[in-house]
Amino acid sequence: MTSTTPPPSTVPPEPAANSFQVDLRGLVDLLSHHLYSSPRVYVRELMQNAVDAVTARQAIEPDADVRIGLWAADGTVGISDSGIGLTAAEAHSLLATIGRSSKRGGEHGLETARKDFLGQFGIGLLACFVVATEIRVVTRSARDLTARPVEWLATDDGSYTVRELDHDAMHEPGTTVVLRARHGAEEWMTPAKVEQLARDYGSLLPYDITFRAGRDDEPRSVTDRPAVWDRPYATPAARRVALAGHCARLFGFTPLDSIDLDLPVAGVRGVAYVLPEPTSPAHRSGHRVHLKGMLLTDQASNLLPDWAFFVRVVLDTDTLRPTASRENLYDDETLAAVREALGSRVRAWLAELAAGEPERLAAFLGVHHLGVKSLARHDAELLGLMLPWLPFETSDGSMSLEEFAAAHSEIHFTRTVEEFRQIAPIAAAHGLGVINAGYTYDADLLALLPAVRPELKVTELDAGAVTERLDPVPTAVELSLASFLSIARTRLEPQGCDVVLRAFQPVAVPALYLDDRQARQERDRTAALDSADSLWTGILGALRGSAPRARLVLNHNNPLIRRIAGLPDETLTGTAVESLYGQALLMSQRPLRPADSALLNRAFLGLLEWATHSHDAQEGQK
């Protein structure tokens, strides 16, 4: 049997393994233009590495005296820590390798402390090249006290050197990093800027970090611990005053109120500040998030449910994941769970106010009832809780649903503000309870209301309901006006509008145009029928129903209506009726159909022609 295996000499050799090469200048361009939003993050990287180093030192020496000091002078920025330090081999392995970190794995016995580290992505000191032309690191290991101090010196051309120093060069374990400014980045390394950035990023870090404007300057603490929400206060009022001052310094406004966010299960501590002015539901506030004390972002827009647009939040968390740039939150299941927990806390705060502090709740709802309505439309229990408080525009004035329901067991509503404003005065005069559901969320809440108060009947206002509440005229009077009503109905038949005669208040309103959804749907169907082909004509014709038509209700109490009804000229009567229809339509502020616009134009020209002819006739009689 012949073998198909080629002779040994013809077997291709295994390909040689090669290593990736990294262009440092290309990496710096990537970091500064695509990963980080601003060069300012270099201060965070310095502090983050120092905090992680002292955290690692405490993992092996719980009683170690840990210190972190930052300084800036003469175009350089430096930071020193009494942390874990590095040996020469570790400096080669860790400082100049992208993606490699002493916090990965257990090679240094620190895996148990890894959850306490801020840095997770292994970009490390190389990120500081966004502002520096040279990075010098002097370090001594706390794990190997016999090891000599090490100097690691790197430049932005991609080269670095590592050399061991004499023991006298550094007596205690720890690390000192010094950056020298690159041309054009000097503004980021001035003492004032560095101190500002250090306070901004590091105010809640778990270690005391100091800053000096030069090595000989008196050090000033940049941390401010414990967090303002964790400090003891003599009274609740004193605490509210302190939180209000914190909000003013942080966000630039004095809050209407504050909400504690103490959620250990979610790994969150902080406070939500209630905005003092109304804001749009579409507005997404930037929230301030610290990760294990280090500021992650002050523009987190995905931290709260959409309905909670009336608060600005500042918090510290140890559970949420940062993005690779550590400038925002990674949107995952953990963030979704925290978002739900924060929303529940805001909701519970509302319930607490309703139960025990109605004055504070009333002050809050006076500004932010829209946010609570947004929440309550998905929460029948909360809606029931807020019934005595949430304001609605009604035919009886502005009031809560609780107050309105006490006066009206049957609640009608309009879907547009314009329709409500036309109907409201007449409804109020005749005891008809109408709510304006044309504002954001109100229609949703009214749809949910029967689930909270089953005894209430909630229906959309229709022409029939209004007409039934208006006073009928005596039969004899209506019979005497039969000819006038016939002319009016004939004239408005092409508009799909019926005409009825009623007596109602206020007297100043001559005519009322009433419409409802079914009537609008019937007109739309008729319009489609007129323009459809034979197939659709048959289908749409089969859908014809007995839906009510729009109604023009003429007010017999109005003197103008009585005068028009007595006109002897049928043509002039018809023109006057069309004018009344147009005026009532305009008062309702509904969009005009082409047929309505044509009618208004015809009626206007007809009245002008009548007026001029009447004038000519009068002149001829002189």
Image: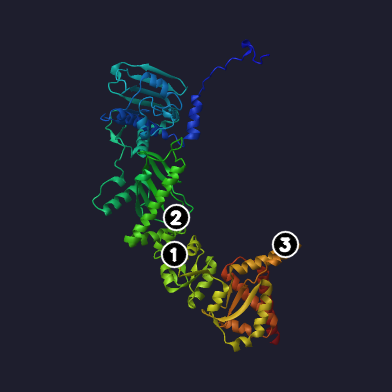
Q: Is residue 224 above or below residue 176?
A: below
Q: How many labels sit on residues?
A: 3
Quadrant assignment, res 536: bottom right
Q: Which residue is mark 2?
A: 279
Q: Amino acid at mark 2?
A: Thr
Residue pictured at 62% horizontal, 74% vertical: 581
Residue on which disc 3 sits: 536
Nearest the eye: 524 or 211: 524
Is 191 left or right of 617, judged from the image as shown? left
- Between the residue at mark 1 and the residue at mark 2, the CA separation in whole angstroms equals 28 Å
Q: Nearer the viewer, residue 57 or 299?
A: 57
Q: Which residue is mark 1?
A: 452
Residue at point 41% right, 31% down?
A: 186
Q: Quadrant of the C terminus?
A: bottom right
Instruction: Decide which of 568, 431 is in the foreground and name it.
Output: 431
N-term-proximal mark, 3 vs 2: 2
Q: Is residue 598 above or below residue 13?
A: below
Look at 42% across and 21% down and name the residue there: 93
Label pair 3/2, CB-CB below 8 angstroms: no
Residue type for callout 1:
Val
Q: Of all residues shown, which one is farthest toward the front? A: 1
Labels 1 and 2: the sequence-earlier one = 2
Question: Which kind of residue does numbered mark 3 sit on?
Answer: Trp
Element carrying mark 1 = helix
